Image (cartoon, rainbow, N blue to C red):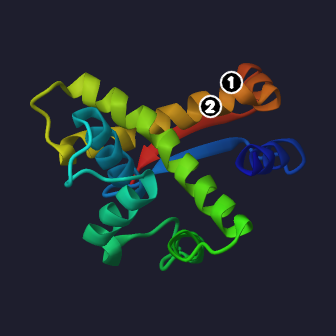
Amino acid sequence: GSMVGSLEFCAGKLGSKLILVLGHTQCGAIAGATKTYLGSKDGPTSKNVGCALEGLLIGLSRVAQQVMVLGHTACGAIKGATKTFLQSKTVRQAKAARALDALLQGLSVVASKSAEELGPTATEEQIASHAVKLNVFHTIDFLLEFSPMIRNKVSSGEVEIQGGIY
């Protein structure tokens, strides 16, 4: 929604010629989604993650000092969503928590594809690392599928989309 709208505004009104989709190594969201996916694949046990948000928190706990999104550390959105989830006392708070949970569940698509591509001997860390790369391509595909404006500008050569990992 808002990501696509922002990119359409930049490409349309501001004349941006390049959309750069970046993924970052040791991504806590991807690690959490991978843990959630692998946990759901094995069936319920006491060691499995109960939801995508819990997986995210576990994933972030390993790299909390390294979390950075384009120079943004100590992300207030993640802190706020986590607080909302953990202390949800109203319907509004619960809806916000479910929205983050849904976002992270969406990442399980790339975790699943990564696990499939790497095979049964891959470790959780290998799957999560590969999923970061796959998520960049997944995001590019999403932009091209759901934004006719961006798709048309890319097709005509007015805009280029590149992906990268940092």
Q: Position of residue 28 (x, y in %)?
A: 37, 60
Residue contact between numbered discs 1 and 2, judged by CB atoms under 8 Å:
yes
Please indicate, yes or no, whether residue 28 appears anywhere in the rendered image: no
Q: Which residue is mark 2?
A: 142
Tag 2 secondary structure:
helix
Residue type at mark 1: give it: Glu
Residue furthest out toward the top: 155
Task: Name which residue type carries label 2.
Answer: Phe
Q: How many marks?
A: 2
Categorize mark 1 by other alpha carbons within 10 Å: few (<14), some (14-19), many (20+). Answer: few
Residue in front for this viewpoint, 126 or 163: 126
Q: Residue at x 36, y 56 (%)?
A: 55
Location of residue 161 in the rendering, given as x and y in whole percent from the top left corner:
61, 35
Q: Position of residue 42 (x, y in %)?
A: 22, 35
**In the rendered image, which quarter is residue 76 located in?**
bottom right
The numbered dot on residue 145 is: 1
Residue 26 to residue 78: above or below: above
Residue 95 vs residue 29: left or right? right
Residue located at (81% from left, 42% from top): 8
Provide residue 114's location: percent of width, then percent of height: 31, 31
Q: Which quadrant holds the N terminus?
A: top right
